[in-house]
Image (tube, grey):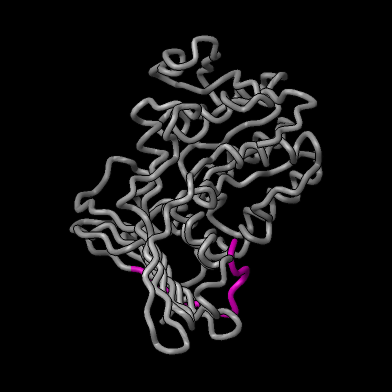
Amino acid sequence: MDTNINKRITAGLLAYGMSGKVFHAPFLNAHEGFDLKAVVERSNKNAVNDYPNMVSYNSVDELLNDGEIELVVINTPNNLHYEHSKAALHAHKHILVEKPFTATSAQAKALFELADSVGKQIFFYQNRRWDSDFASVKKVLESGKLGKLNEMHLRYDRYRNVIGPKAFKENPVEASGLLYDLGPHLLDQVISLFGKPLSFYKILGKNRIGTLVDDYFSIHLSYPDSVNVFVTSSMLVVNPQPGFVLHGVNGSFIKQRSDIQEEQLLAGMKLTDAGYGIEAADKDGLLTTIDANGKKTEEIIPSEAGNYLPLFEAVYQAISNKKPYPVTREDVLTQIEIIESPVTT
């Protein structure tokens, strides 16, 4: 990464649960353009164990009142994203907001207007664009080996048959349920490839005993030139299907959902360690093509390396050098409009 560092940006995290510990702090700490100064920890003070010089504030207001902090990571529960984003913008901070950005497109537009009025930038934490598996899918698509794409399936499945402890995910509050949890990942990947769909058809389900929120969704998105994309997620899949299945005129590509970064970071691996972001060989994708004579050829496609650091590089370049951030407002509005739309009947 050819980073052009002309200033250092002081950053703060609004929480130090798994997202702060795994998805944000290691990258802000590793990037030469950021100084990771502070975090909000209301009870357990754990950040100091990983970052001895980290300031631990007791409240969001304390962190937002820190005049040195220029960038605030909004990694609080889904239903607080709008409130905390608004507060941070009013405090004249740039913000990096986890998915879902907001619960509604109206909230998103209000934040865009506020950011423009105070001269600050909003960044969307859509890290799955930098996953190993998705990078492998993009490489195959860009190679042209599939020919014209006909159909693409993306799945993100889990098996959790009990109601989880996180109230903001399991109770019917704003931005709860599986569609708001994993839908932004899948939809952003599709939108990054194909843009806004011509139309879509959405189904939600509640399958776990006692669930108060959706734990299944499937969305069919239609694109020009008869390209059909299906995104599906379920919390009751014991034996997950491939995360990516693509069919084109000349062949098919099948790839497991397999990015390893979260697992490695939880295990204490550093971004600079050999093997970071590298998948095991048994996670490689399978490309099957057919020629004009009907001969099939199978090709193992090694997984691309995953790395979320380019996302933080993009944030840095946008703030310091006014370069465009790859996840646009239009991308996120398209995503939210699909998520908030009524279920198709």
Relative to 83, say whether 36 is above or below.
Answer: above
The quadrant in which residue 246 appears is bottom left
> Does residue 202 belong to the magenta stretch?
yes
**In the depicted view, which residue is nearer to us: 72 or 238?**
238
Question: What's the residue at 42%, 39% (across, down)?
Answer: 261
- Where's residue 174, x and y in %? 46, 52
Instruction: Between residue 154 and residue 39, name the one nearer to us.
Output: 154
Mark yes or no: residue 219 visible. no
Side of 239 where 131 appears, left or right: right
Would you say 151 lies left or right of 117 here? Answer: left
> The N terminus is located in which quarter?
top right
Instruction: Look at 31% across and 68% down and name the residue there.
Output: 205
Q: Nearer the viewer, residue 157 or 96?
A: 157
Name the residue furthest top. 52
Identify the image quadrant of residue 19: top left
Q: Is residue 198 above or below residue 172?
A: below
Where's residue 113, x and y in %? 75, 50
Q: Position of residue 93 (x, y in %)?
A: 71, 32
Q: What quarter of the picture does the C terminus occupy?
A: bottom left
* Residue 72 part of the magenta-drawn span: no
* Numbered range of the magenta stretch: 192-204
Where does the image place residue 82, in percent across and percent down from the top left?
Answer: 58, 45
